Amino acid sequence: MTRTALRAARLFDGVTTHADPLVIVEDGRITEVRTGPAPADADLVDLGTATLLPGLIDTHVHLGFDAGPDPVAALASRDDDAVLEAMAQAAAAQLRAGVTTVRDLGDRDYLALRLRESTAGLPTIVAAGPPITSPGGHCHFLGGVADRGVRDAVREHAERGVDVIKVMASGGGMTPESDVNSPQFTPDDLAALVDEAHRHGLPVTAHAHALGAIVDGVAAGVDGLEHCTFIDGERVNAPADVVAAIVRRRIAVGATVGLAPVDPAEFRPPPFLAKILPELMANLARLIREGAVVVAGTDAGIGPIKPHGVLPHGLAHLAQLGMHPAEALTAGTSTAAQVCGLGDRKGRVRPGYDAHLLAVDGDPLTDIGALLRPVAVFVAGRPVVTAARS
């Protein structure tokens, strides 16, 4: 039996902090978290002045999208083998950024489920398969059209072995023929979808830009709301009673935060988005302030400003919107693990949990930008990424 002892200057365990920690790992699991000398029979990895924390968790990615200028066309041009190879490369990029678990909320024809079974040092993948959508609706080209009804679509996904049901409750920007202002399902259909998913033991998270889609999703009993932008015509409109229901029922808000640094001359948001962006950010800050469960779902893959591995920028963004750095770290670790259904083994540094760990140069509790300086990434206790240190 191989034992490894990891020593660092400090530890954020997913909830709280510790000084001079020693983390003992056996067979891919954490067995002890303490201070003091390393066991004589353990291989010591001294991380020096680094901070050790759980591997980060991105609750909303698209491994099948290549973060290029036209990811939809790029995906359409590849056969399944080429897509799987590109998805593996995207997953590896996530690891290099310290992201050891991703929730893929929209692939083509269940390819993320095939990648999920790989043991080749990839992040843990929580997979939704192709998102359930309406005929001609948002991301219909991924293969999740509910043309035989929503209950049948959920049953097919459950039989294929998905971890979560993703439903396109409104239109979206990557499908021009859809409308971000309009719900894509009736309230009764959305309620039936949630009922069927819960009957199969599956949570439901809803892509929801339109105010009406958010209202319908809350009424239907969804477990999560992706984007949750409250778009109402030309403005953002978040009624107090709807916000209160989201907070009270602990519906997870997947905030689409995190942008890679880009030259403003090379990236201009669409005019409508540019117009309402200040309102969107103000409302997200309001949700944080009022106590909603907010996690960072970056939507990685959908364009050049959303490369795979952008989550550290997303957690810094949450801090800019009002979270204390410790709260942002919690959102990206233990809370995200709970949202992904993995709270019993991910997102914490404690005995019994998977030894998926990240070490960063500096103290992210005082400078969350330290997340952008990974020193080492461990999957099941094995280093998969190391950085040269001066």
Image (cartoon, rainbow, N blue to C red):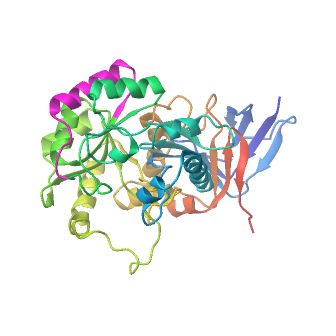
* Magenta stretch encompasses residue 333: no
308 relative to 222 in the view: left or right: right
- Residue at 41%, 56% (x, y): give it: 72
282 relative to 366 in the view: left or right: left
* Residue 318 quadrant: bottom left
Question: Can residue 347 be seen at all in this image of the molecule?
Answer: no
- Residue at 44%, 37% (x, y): give it: 129
Instruction: Residue lying at the far bottom in this picture: please name it.
Output: 265
Q: Depth check: 144 or 344 in front?
A: 144
Coordinates of residue 348 in the picture (x, y in percent): 56, 37
Q: Depth check: 1 or 146 in front?
A: 146
* Magenta stretch encompasses residue 191: yes
Q: Depth check: 89 or 139 in front?
A: 139
326 up-or-down from 184: above or below:
below
17 relative to 289 in the view: left or right: right
Coordinates of residue 360 in the picture (x, y in percent): 62, 57
Q: Which residues are magenta?
A: 180-204
Coordinates of residue 44 in the picture (x, y in percent): 81, 45
134 up-or-down from 231: above or below:
above
- Residue at 16%, 32% (x, y): give it: 187
Q: Depth check: 66 or 352 in front?
A: 66
In which quadrant is the N terminus drawn? Answer: top right
